[in-house]
Image (tube, rainbow, N blue to C red):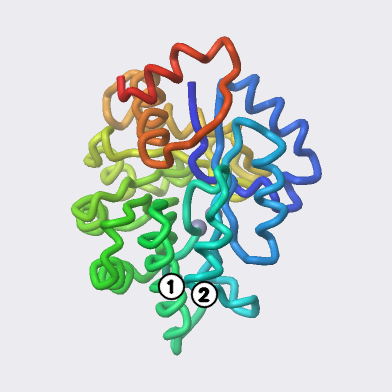
Amino acid sequence: MYVDSHCHLSFPELAQDLPGVLQRMRDSNVVAALNVCTTLTEFPAVLAVAEQHSHIVASVGVHPDSQDTEEPTVERLVELADHPKVVAIGETGLDYFRLQEPLEWQRSRFRTHIRAARQCGKPLIIHTRASPDDTIRVMQEEGAGEAGGVMHCFTESLAVAEAAMALGFYISFSGIVTFKNARALQEVARAVPLQRLLIETDSPYLAPVPYRGKTNEPSFVPKVAEKVAELKNMSVADVAAGSTANFFNLFRAVRDIPAEHDQSVAAAQNGN
Ligand SMILES: [Zn+2]
Ligand SMILES: [Zn+2]
């Protein structure tokens, strides 16, 4: 039983065949997914998928790469997060790879999300790219540890992972960990304890080996679990069960479970 902790079901690549995407999820034993929001404009569509499907939950937030878009306030985020299917604030964070300084607006937007997460008591989904020091600094300055959350699609060093874990954050690995040129990241995955680890697709991008070049989708997340298991010298079942339990512990996701999964989900939610 697997969970995709980060995907974008509302992006056109997946939205155009949502029934097929959800069917292949079931066929691959992927029992739940977190549909992640990137702009306030997108939010109604993100939430609609979660409202229509018991095993999908949603987040609310504005991505650091979304430049010409409605700027969120703490009040607006808290208001939109006040819904049982909105389980997280994000994705938010810093991205110095795609955009260049001056990026004070990006850091300020990141602070807004952390304040909203603290206020509504829901965890953060943090995107960090080419900005490790500032990401950790802002998290520390804003007390992000009080909200907790996940460093999603993690590609930074073990030192950055450790700094985030010290704040109580989980580290989520995507299909990038299966890539041949991802040796350094594979070493990080080896070192992050299973108790702190999540898996995700970040679909529709970054399909794992052996699907590279294809449109990524939640049904591919077992490939991430298989790679993590190989790296950590564990069984795939242990990585699947551990990462699924972590997902439910972190996001406290409320949902209906297909009957055949009842017992295993209950066990996962209890942290077994
Ligand atoms: Zn991201
Ligand atoms: Zn994303």
Q: Which residue is mark 2?
A: 73
* CA distance for labels 1 and 2: 6 Å
Quarter of the image with the C terminus is top left
Q: Secondary structure at mark 1?
A: helix
Residue 43, located in which quarter of the rendered image?
A: bottom right
Considering only vertical position in the picture, is 67 above or below 147?
A: below
Q: Horizontal placement of 231 versus 205: left or right?
A: left
Q: Is residue 168 left or right of residue 3?
A: left
Residue appearing at x 62%, y 65% in the figure? 39
Judge from the rendering whether residue 171 lies leftward or rightward of residue 27; answer left or right. left
* Residue 92 position within the rendered picture, expressed as x and y whole percent measured from the top left: 47, 64
Q: Which residue is identified by label 1?
A: 112
- In the image, residue 63 sits, relative to residue 52, either above or below, namely below
Depth check: 188 or 152 in front?
A: 152
Q: Amino acid at mark 2?
A: Thr
Where residue 56 appears, x then y in whole percent?
Answer: 60, 37
Relative side of 105 to 196, left or right: right
Q: Callout 2: helix, strand or loop?
A: loop
